[in-house]
Amino acid sequence: MSTETPTVEFSDDRLLWAVGAVLVLLGLAIIFSGLEFGLSGIILIVIEVGIFFLLYALLVLPVNVQFGVSGLVNFGPVLWFGIGAYATAMLASTGSYQGVTFGFPWPIAVLAGVVLAILVGLLLGVTTLQLRGDFLAVVTLAAAEILYGIVEKVGGFGGATGIGGVPRIFEAASFPMTDLAVTFVLAGVVVFVYALAQRITDSPYGRLLKAIRSDEDATEALGKPTFRYKVLVFIYGAVIMGLAGSLLALYNGAVSPGFITLDVTVLVWIGMLIGGAGSNRGSVYGLAIIMGLQLFTRIANEAFPVSQSQFAALRLMIIGLLLVLIIRYRPSGIWGNPEEREVL
Amino acid sequence: MGILETDGVTKEFGGLTAVDDVNLEVDQGEIVGLIGPNGAGKTTYFNCITGFYPVTRGTVHFEGQDVTEMEPWERAREGMVRTFQQSRTMQSMTVKDNVKLTALDHPGERIVPTLLRSDEMVEYEQDVEERAYELLERFDLADQADTYAAQLSGGQRKLLEVARGMMMDPDLFLLDEPYAGVEESMVGRIADYVRELNEEEDMTFVVIEHGLEALVELVERLVVLHNGAVIADGDPHEVVNDEQVIEVYLGSSIE
């Protein structure tokens, strides 16, 4: 044989795990040390947007593994986010102004939230993953809207006010310190999930998922149970997205329909497409760009004498323009690999 | 007992009978050509054999086992591998990954070894890499190992489909129009590979082509389908001179 077989190597991700652990420990240190110092107004805004960026990063990573890597159009990440959030909130809340609550210990509530997210993932997956891709898009989108309708209108879910009285497990010495601690803990969790997503993507598992994205029938002809893998990918996503919802409830101490609107799904998708579907790093960076714009307009809004809604409109225009430019000049996204984009 | 046996395989789409009561027995080590004009039901028949279409009636036996109810991926794992009329290489994956993908029972296709990056998984991947390179060498694709399959020529894509299938060490290879969309210079090479695999590894082939003469030199036995039914089965030289077969190809009625 003339060519030498290269040695198989997987990227070394020990640093990632270490960084994640340090971040989580830093967050916990802030909580348990009772540390307190002042933070300026701008820093507080950055932290507040940052927390939602990190929560949504826990949505964009699974959505990228589902769509970017495996080709499954999940237009309902907020569905699993909402299930995790509401299940955890209702089960753990020790007394809400409105809605039914149970007052279980929070770890049980988190577990139940994740299990429920899995069950819904399984149900939607098994019933629709055998259909064509666009059906999946419609079903996931509709399911997310149904959940929104249920929690807002059906009694027991707290209506527009939502569920309060959820134990705030990240409570530190003061409100700004809590936000800072949560930022560290969530950043650590995002790094862990990113490392896991990378391990899936950059492995024989990811190769199989990409093959399903590229040509499902041909993959099946090569002895792969493609349907089973599609369902599994839906379930892995459900776990992470449900967990993200649980973390929202336990950080915020309350959940309401406003947290689970279609906007979340749109934000996650636009972030992924701008950053590059198929690239875990790209999707997170893309989300950072979009949320960076949000942050910029919030800070700039304080400096300019225009109304908040005008600024919001301006932000949408910028995002729209960015999307048009990306689709026109770099359809695989900023960090996406053009050669791995599926051309139909 | 043949390696592949179809008994009364029939496929109906509404009122249309695409495959009509096809009985075929293929013996281990044979190269069988399956020809017929466009629309004769050749690919539909392949889809029935490989499980992509459930049959309306009839049974498919592979290596003595009734596989009629099996999923396509289960049949592939049993050793029945196919290619497609329009090459179905994964265009957004490299040539090497196309071949490595096909490795069976990879620990890296289970979630726990993947997330833990178990030694077993890494070692298996190294073995797979080595086998993939051997196959790429054999099919003269090693230089393209890291190019994306989208950049291959039509003939190279057909070869890649065969190389990829070989990773599963199949017993029966079903080739759907291996010469379609292939540059002239490659046609002979593809035929050579089929002969070589047949002679050296006793691999059984069923090959579809629509041209009447295309397979005469390659195969030992030619089966002709017309309107979903077998109208001739035998020595290739005799079959192509069969009056009924010629009439079918010239388009006149056989009634």
Image (cartoon, helix red, strand yellow):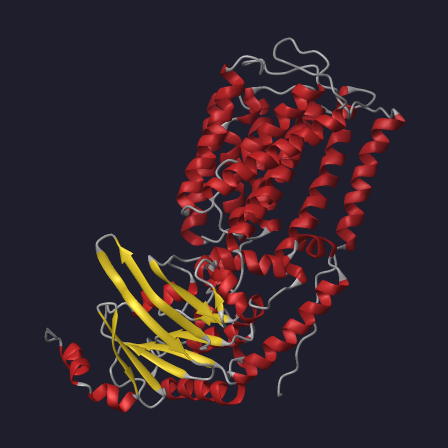
x and y, in percent, of residue A149 in the image: 48, 21
Front in this rendered view, residue B251 or A15: B251
Which residue: 74% across, 64% down? B120
Which one is nearer the viewer's eye here, A144 or A296?
A: A144
Left/right placement of residue A209 relative to residue A132 reads right
- Quadrant of the image containing the C terminus of chain A: bottom left
Looking at the image, residue A130 sits to the left or right of residue A210; the answer is left
Q: Quadrant of the N terminus of chain A?
A: bottom right
Instruction: Give the image quarter of residue A28.
Output: top right
x, y percent for residue A268:
54, 38
Residue A293: % across, % down: 55, 35
Give the residue at x 53% y 76%: B166
Q: Would residue B66 be found to the left or right of residue A42 on screen?
A: left
Q: Residue furthest front?
A: B1
Which residue sits furthest right? Answer: A33
Q: For the image shown, how many numbered marks are present on the structure?
A: 0
Q: Is residue B157 visible?
A: no
- Give the quarter of the image for residue A31: top right
Compared across the picture, whether A193 is left or right of A151 comes to right
In the displayed image of the protein, which residue is found farthest to the top? A97
User: Please, is residue A343 above or below residue A37 in the view?
Assistant: below
Query: Is residue A22 at all visible to an observer of this figure?
Result: yes
Residue drawn where x is 47% and y is 63% of the image: B67
Q: Position of residue A304 (x, y in %)?
A: 54, 23
Q: Is residue B130 above or below residue A11?
A: below
Q: Is residue B150 above or below residue A85?
A: below
